[in-house]
Image: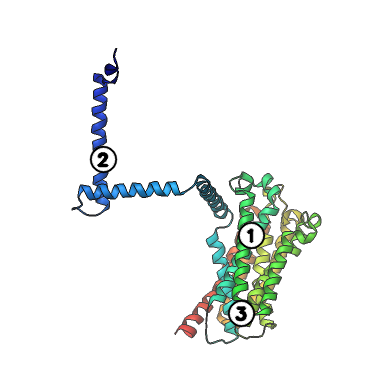
Amino acid sequence: MNDKNLNMPSDNNKYTLEQNANTGLDSTTTQLADYAKELNSDETSTSEVLDARALSKQDNYVADNDVSPQSKNIFKRFGHFIKRLYIYQKEMLPFWKSIFISALLFFQIYLYVIIIGEIGNLNIGVQEFVVCFSLFAFLYSLRIADDLKDIEVDKRLFAHRPIPSGRTKKKDIIILLVLLNVASITLNVVFMRDNPFYFIAYAALLGYGVLMSVWFFARSKIQPNLILALFTHNPIGVIINSYVIVFTSLRFNLPIFTINNLLLALTLYWPTLIWEISRKVKAPKDENDYVTYSKIFGYKKITLIILIIITIDLVTSSILMFQLWPWGLFAVVAAYVWFVVRCIQFYKKPTSLKIGKQVEIYTAITETPMIIIQALFILFVWIL
């Protein structure tokens, strides 16, 4: 067999070559037609399409060769990082929900202070945005810090969560924690530096958050003691409320230390305290290794404690509501009566409902009238 015979295709090879050629031709024709559609022009010539396609391939070739393997690896790792953070925020605390809660809390306090202060000119600017973002960053940092503190407990009791399951890495949320606080501090330094008294309130907020994250340097005593943890950590709610009150008062040259401001700070704190307690209250048959207040006190005694706090909340809420809108007292009292009935039901038959859910409904009912009143004030006083 000579060299020519080696280079000559057999009959089967000829058929394959012809088939490939036809396939390639059909493929090219299809690509040209598709590209002509992409150009949205029925008059596009074949040469124009080929020139555009060649240019596109050249651009892609240049772009691919401009990106080094190291850069591609960085982009890939960053993409995985974003995906892991997405899983974390989706399952633990969605960003949108935290932003909404922060904005709602801010404007609820902000509007109450200026309504009672009879401020007739609403002027929302960049400083309001900075405080809103600071609240969001702080509240989300508390969520992250709480998860970091409870990693070992979560591995035993909540292995399905993002960090114990390995779907989100510990270092991911640490990076997020750092980024949030760097952004918050930077915004405050840039836009709020002219108000030293405000910075005292902001520093107190961050400082208390840091102390909470390190268990007030007494982890061995506080962590195993649910009651001690409540008394040391939960007052952060009052500090958050006071932080917004201080900002608003300074913003509109209003007095800071007033009875109304004290009542406001406490009234918006009681639901936080009640919710923190109630979410760790279970029926006896639902108890497990997780430490709850119902396990410490018994579900009946802790229900009575919740009722006492709710009664205090009724008093302070009624005083504030009466100043805004006396008729709003009906909603406050109705919510209180409804909640007492639900607590009695839980007291008699703990498996009939979850007390934590009832607290959420109660809070929504009592705070909705205040939000509506504030919205009406904005509409009729500052807009119309």
The residue that appears at 74% across and 63% down in the rendered structure is 211
Three-letter amino acid code at disc 3? Thr
- Tell me residue 332's x, y (percent): 60, 74
Which numbered mark, 1 or 2, is in the foreground of this view? 2
* Local SS, label 1: helix
The mark that comes first in sequence, 2 or 3, is: 2
Q: Which residue is mark 3?
A: 248
Q: Which residue is mark 2?
A: 28
The mark that comes first in sequence, 1 or 3, is: 1
Vertical side of 196 occupied by 306: above or below: above
Query: Quadrant location of the N terminus?
Result: top left
- Tell me residue 132's x, y (percent): 57, 70
Mark 3 crowdedness (10 Å alpha carbons): few <14, some 14-19, many ≥20: many
In front: 186, or 244? 186
Mark 2 crowdedness (10 Å alpha carbons): few <14, some 14-19, many ≥20: few
Is residue 362 at least partly visible in the picture? no
Name, please, the residue furthest toward the left.
43
Left or right of 301, for residue 335: left
Left or right of 96, for residue 294: right
- Tell me residue 199's x, y (percent): 67, 75
Vertical side of 135 occupied by 257: above or below: below
Q: Which mark is residue 178?
A: 1
Mark 1 crowdedness (10 Å alpha carbons): few <14, some 14-19, many ≥20: few
Query: Quadrant location of the C terminus?
Result: bottom left
The residue that appears at 63% across and 78% down in the rendered structure is 247
Three-letter amino acid code at disc 1? Val
Which numbered mark, 1 or 3, is in the foreground of this view? 1
Q: Which mark is residue 45?
A: none
